[in-house]
Structure formats: structure tokens, C-alpha cells
Amino acid sequence: LPECSLSRSLLDACPYAFTLDGQARITATGAYFPPGPDGPVGKEFCQVFSPRDREMNEVIAAFARSGEPPSPTAHKRLEIDLNGSDDIVLIGSLLPLSDGGLLFLGTLSPSLIGNLDKLKLTLSDFAPFDVLPDFAMMAQINHAVLVDTQMLNKDLSEARDHAVQARREIEIVAMRDDLTGLGNRAAFQRMANEISASVSAVSDSQVHMLLVDLNRFKPINDHFGHHVGDQLLTQIGQKLTDHVCENGHAFRLGGDEFAVLYRGIDYPSAFENASALVRSVNGTYATNETTLVASASGGFASLPRDADDFTSLYKAADIALYSAKKTTDAALICVSRSLIQEAVERDQLETELGMAVDIGQLSNAYQLQFDIDTGLIAGAEALARWHNPRRGAQVPPAEFIPIAESACIVPQIDLFVLEEAMRQSSLWRSQNIALPVSVNLSPVTLEMPGLTGRILQFLDKQAVDPSAIEFEITENAIIRDCEAVKANLSHMDRLGLNIAIDDFGAGQTSLSHLAALPVTRLKLDRCLITDIGSSERKQHVVRSLIELAGDLDLKVTVEGIETQAEADFIQAIGGVTAQGFLFARPKSAPELDPYLLAAAPHGRKPAANITSDRFQAAG
Ligand code: C2E
Ligand code: MG
Ligand code: MG
């Protein structure tokens, strides 16, 4: 716009604006000032206004004398008393115009906002700026008006409509998950807030929540790459969209976690839809690279049936999901009182476990292992024991190790057991008892950077030979295919430490891993040996595994031998180590000492035919 129409537009837009010519005479004003002979136009600035600031007064007087516009620093801000009244003040900036004049772009002082009646103004007088004036905003207002001059001639309500529409569009994008087109976590949270507000207002409102999590999604992602994982998630999002009922809203909360919120629908109907959704996920999915089989687990909870508010509803659905992930025979589980109780106990154990090592509640038990051919003691497995005073009893490792793993406190426990086992091994050696000791390492511990450094420290401190220590790792650690695990394992191998695969045959055994990894022993899981007499297939499997291990130059321990028949079967094959309640239960070191010291020589039991009688002496 040419400058004259620019200043005219500004004067139209800003009721408190006016312009001065080179002699500081008022040439035009905004709508606030009275027009005609009563108005300020044509009069000198100093006749009409009194700037509050003495310096500013001089700036204007100098301008009137010389016609030179004030320097950029001088014309920053001008405060003017109006109507001779102290509390009516115009605040604004003086801006030089190219014709040598000045433009005062002003607004009312903030202190007047509460007194608008007095001035017979309404808030709409401020509409051009859509803000209430304050000092901080002045610069922005002037800046915006000067830059965006086009806007001045536009209908402001149209501009506001545009802004509202743009905000709506931004909001829609911000609330949508890019991959699946479902609502994202922010959208879920927004609905949660709405529900929380309505739940307190309408006490009998029914809300149900389904949480869905894919089974074994991480291995798919790790193995085939994220682009394949993303294609799978997109298709699963589509399935949820297709199958969700009209009272349900589906969201992707992140990763492979989905949620559905149901409102205005009864419990059986919501549950029926939730079951259908979880079932709908099961199936095969074609991606660009490969075809995948996927399945999901679901947790379901309802408000007010299972929870008082939205936060506890989410927790309840999560508890049910946790339970569904653990069970293999149910894809969808509804939360129950006992599940909630279990979760509370688990939380409590987690807190207590965090302190257990430090306050000396952990100790080691040792279960002896025997050479099945000679009957000699072949070694001992160190097993963690936790005495929990609140329970007044020991918590079994099968209960606390998984809690420790999920809470990432298991490395602390494993390292305690390891250090203690080395201390004990060194003590036994000083008593002429040479007993190889094996220690369990959780997959979480195996990922720990600096693990081998800690192991070396312990070995040095107790002067223990690395060949006297064996580490038991589970197949889970191996199938994670994690670089940190591989690095630790190969470092341990270089240090001459023995590595055994524990519970072999109970999980997703991959024989290909055996050849590739620095493993020295297989520990066959109890499930392979239990009731072996009644299953020819099992007998065949165990025989073949022992043979295969021999071919791969791996030693074998058979775990969980409880009956004489099982022992006889293993002894007939021969060449392995045996561990089981039939021979010895886990005992504390002081309980084992008399037995070990009596066994001759060097703590070894003399060779004998294997019978339960002979081994019961070990406990
Ligand atoms: P595991 O490493 O396979 O240890 C053998 C488990 O089988 C021990 O259970 C032992 O008491 C039990 N067992 C031995 N012989 C028999 C038998 O004839 N019949 C039956 N039914 N069970 C037998 P425990 O001590 O309850 O430990 C269970 C699991 O907890 C261990 O299985 C191991 O996976 C884990 N665990 C124990 N201590 C530690 C530890 O210090 N660190 C880690 N990461 N895991 C540990
Ligand atoms: Mg073990
Ligand atoms: Mg085992």
C-alpha cells in the first residue's frame, strides 16, 4: 500500500492512532478522537497532549523545531495523559513516516480496562488486535499491524474464522496417529479428561476400556526391520477400525499398544466387541517383504465395576493385559479382584526387592550336581534366596526373579549371587573342597555394559580361577539377538569362563544358535525328563539331544531328576551330569559343609552306582 493509505488504514484500524506533520501538528486521528473543530486535528501536539515523560516532551518539541524525526531509540514509547486525567493514558509508539511526519500508534493503558464504562468504550474497541493491550504486547501489535497491512482491510471476523479453522485442522493432525490413522495418545488423553469430567458429574455412566498389545512384536521388528513392523501395525490399525463398534473409539498409544474406549454401551456388549477385536488381529499379514503371523493379547476393565476413576480404570485394564500376556490359553482377560490383589502384592514386592540386597535379605543356596557315571560331585548351582520378613517366609525365585527383571533390579541380584558364590568357592577351596560353581545370569544382566569388568573384579578379589565358574543363561537371552549380549558372551568366552544354556528344551530352542555361540554346556530342562518312562517320544528326544550335544562338543546336565526311573534312564545313556531333588535339594553353604567335608578326597563323593539311597545323603 502507498504510505498515505497505509497510515489511513492504520488510523481506521486503531482508534487511538494519530499522525503528526513535520511541525508536530496533528494531521489525522483514529476514531476515538472527536472530529471537527472540537477534535485535535490541526492543533499542535503540545496544545492537546501532555506526554508523561519529560524526555519524550523534549523529543516532540525538538521534532517541532527541526522537523527531524526522532532517533529510533527516542521514539520507542510514548505515554500521553488524556483529558487532563492522570488515569487515562494512551500508550504507543511513534513511528516515522516517509513524508517527514510521525505516526503514533497507540492503545489505552491496561489500568483502564476495568474502567471502560467511564470512557464509554466497549471491549470491541480493541477488536482490531484481538488482544487486551498490555505493555509486552505493544511491540507485537505495532509490528504485526505494520507488516500485515493487507489484513487491515479484510473483514476481521473472516480472519478469525480462518484462524479457528486452521487451529481445528492442526488439532486433528496432532490427535491422529500417522501410521494407522487412529487417535493417538494425545487423543486418548483428551477423551480420558472428558470421561473424568463426566464421570464425576454422572455417577452411573458406564465406560469400558480394552488395552491390546501384540504378541512378540519386538522380535518381528528386530528381525525384519521397522519398515515391516510399521506395515504390520498399519494393517492391524485397519482391522481395529473395521471391527470396532459405533460406541467404541480406537487409539494407538504407541509401539504395538492399542486401546479402545467404550461409552454409552453396557458391559456385555462392550466385552463382546472387545473379544471380536482381539480375535480379529489374529491371522496372517502380507507385507512387501514377507508374510507374518500375528496375534494379540487384551486386557479389559470397566468403570464403575472395576475402578472408581479413569486412572484406576487404565491400571485395571493394564493388570488384565499383563495377565493375558502371561497366559497362553486366553487372548483376552477381564480384570478381577484377585488380579488386582496380585498386582498390588507384586508392586509391594518390587518395592521391597529394591532394598533386599542392601539390607541383607538375600542369600545363596547351592544345589549339588553329580556325574551320573561315577557318582562324584561335579559341581553346585548357586540359587538366590530371599527372606521377606513381611511374608515371614522365603519368596521363591520363580516369583521374584520375573519382578526383578521387569523392574531392572535383576543385575543387582545376579551380581550379589555371583560375588557371594565366588566368596564361598574361595572359602571351600581353602578347606580343600574343589567345587565348580554355576551362577544364573538373567538376559537383562547379560545386556549390562561393563558386566565382564565386574566379573573380573570379583574373580581377582577372591583369587578364583575362571574355569571354576560357569554362567547359566537362558535361551531368551540368546534369541533377543542383542549386540550387547553378544559382546558380553564373547568377552566372557575369551576370559575362559564357561557358559551353559539353562532350561534347554523349555523355550524357543534354536539349534542354530548352539553352533554359533561360545557355549560349553546344555542344561536339559526338567520338562524333558519328567515321566520319561511313560513317553517313548520323550526318551527319543532326550537321547537325540544328548547325542547332538556330544557331536557339538557340549557337556550336558540333566535337570530336575526326581525319581529313580528318571535317574536310571539317564544313567543308561551316561556321560552327563545330573541335578535333581532325587540327589540333592538346594541347601545353604553351612548346611552343605559337613557333607562336603566328609566326602573324600577334596570334597568329592567316591564313585558309586547311582541309586537314590547313595545320593540322599547329600540332602
Ligand atoms: P534354574 O536355574 O533352572 O534352577 C533350577 C531350579 O530347579 C531351582 O529352582 C531348583 O530348586 C529347581 N530344581 C532342581 N531340581 C529339581 C527337581 O528335581 N524338581 C523340581 N521340581 N525342581 C528342581 P529355584 O531355586 O526355585 O529357582 C528357579 C529359577 O529361578 C531358576 O531356575 C533360575 O531360572 C531362577 N534363579 C534362581 N536364582 C537365580 C539368580 O541368582 N539369578 C537369576 N537370574 N535367576 C535365578
Ligand atoms: Mg540355572
Ligand atoms: Mg534350569
Image (cartoon, rainbow, N blue to C red):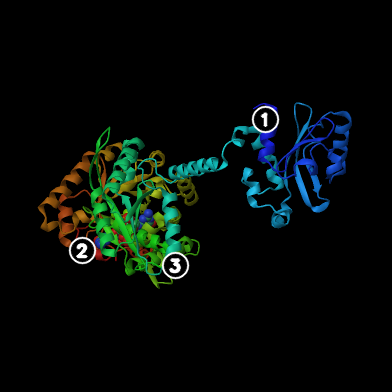
In this view, 255 is above or below 534: above
Marks 2 and 3 close (CB-CB < 8 Å): no
Q: Residue furthest front?
A: 37
* SS at mark 3 in the image: helix
Q: Name the quarter showing ligand 3.
A: bottom left
Q: Quadrant of the N terminus?
A: top right
At which x and y percent is residue 327? 27, 57
Give the mark nearest the N terminus, 3 or 1: 1
In this view, 489 is above or below 355: above
Residue 612 circle label: 2
Task: Answer with the quarter of the image where residue 397 lies.
Answer: bottom left
Identify residue type, mark 3.
Ala
- Mark 3 beta carbon near ligand 1 (under 8 Å): no
At which x and y percent is residue 155? 56, 39
**Apparent side of residue 159 relative to residue 418 in the rendered image (left or right):** right
Give the mark nearest the N terminus, 2 or 3: 3
- Mark 2 beta carbon near ligand 1 (under 8 Å): no
Callout 2: few (<14), some (14-19), or many (20+) C-alpha neighbours within 10 Å?
Answer: some
Residue 5 circle label: 1
526 and 128: which one is in front? 128
Task: Answer with the quarter of the image where residue 368 lies.
Answer: bottom left
Identify residue type, mark 1.
Ser
* SS at mark 1 in the image: helix
Q: Residue at x 30, y 62 (%)?
A: 265
Q: Where is mark 3, residue-wise?
A: 201
At which x and y percent is residue 355? 48, 62
